[in-house]
Amino acid sequence: MEVIGIVAISLDGFITQGNKPGSAFTSAADKVWFSQILETFSAHLMGSVTFEAEREPITRAARNTSSKLRLVFTRSPRKYHSLAKPGRLEFTDEHPAAVLRRIRDQGHERVALLGGGQIYGLFLRENLLDELWVTLEARVFGTGTPVFAGEHRKNLNLIEVANLDPNTLLLKYKPE
């Protein structure tokens, strides 16, 4: 199974603008690329903060008959019991490695990790990321949520660079 972290960041390394949740700051080019690329993954994993920032579109998508799994890591899965749709929208407090084993056994081969900082940090620390795809937006926030919460010492190898538009880069990395 392949696990790809997908994140949009400002030039100063933040995934949110100050304390505003969500990715409203991203360019039109990133929004188009992101929606197209998500279609190539059978499972989307995220933390509860990311889920809450995009709750309506995620729950709406889970109501349709899509075969995509949206799985939310939370310390309180029972809090979301009324929203859960087995196989489409699930909430868990399991360890990420156990989740990955379980969804691999369910037939998921390509997983998108969609944040936030706590989740990216956890997957990086546990060596569970195969690649990290970073959309670099030409913006400076000064404050916000860093890409990786916690302390990390990892080297990443740049494997691809693409322009999404004149001011937006897509950088693909492979952790060592």
Image: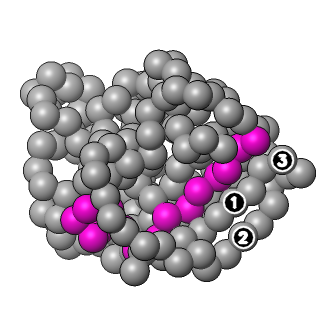
Q: Is residue 137 above or below residue 2?
A: above
Q: From mark 2 to mark 1, how far is it between C-alphas?
A: 6 Å
Q: Is residue 154 left or right of residue 171?
A: left
Mark 3: secondary structure: loop
Q: Earlier in the sequence, mark 3 or mark 2?
A: 2
Q: Is residue 34 above or below residue 173?
A: above
Q: From mark 3 to mark 2, how far is it between C-alphas?
A: 13 Å
At 52% from the left and 26% from the top, the residue drawn is: 143
- The residue beneath circle 1 is 170
Label 2 environment density (alpha carbons within 10 Å; few <14, some 14–19, many ≥20): some
Does any portion of residue 71 appear in the rendered image? no
Q: Are marks 1 and 3 in contact (CB under 8 Å)?
A: no
Q: Which is more toward the observer, 125 or 68?
A: 125
Does any portion of residue 28 appear in the rendered image? yes
The amino acid sitting under disc 1 is Leu
Q: Are marks 2 and 1 in contact (CB under 8 Å)?
A: yes
Q: Which is more toward the observer, 106 or 51?
A: 51
Q: Is residue 48 left or right of residue 27?
A: left
The amino acid sitting under disc 2 is Val
Relative image position of residue 105 (x, y in whole percent)? 20, 72
Q: Residue furthest top?
A: 19
Question: Which segment did they paint magenta?
Answer: 124-138
Relative image position of residue 75 (x, y in whole percent)? 13, 34
- The residue beneath circle 2 is 161
Q: Quadrant of the C terminus?
A: bottom left
Relative image position of residue 136 (x, y in whole percent)? 67, 50
The amino acid sitting under disc 3 is Asn
Q: Quadrant of residue 108?
A: bottom left
Label 3 environment density (alpha carbons within 10 Å; few <14, some 14–19, many ≥20): few
- The residue beneath circle 3 is 167
Q: Quadrant of the N terminus?
A: bottom left
At 66% from the left and 44% from the top, the residue drawn is: 11
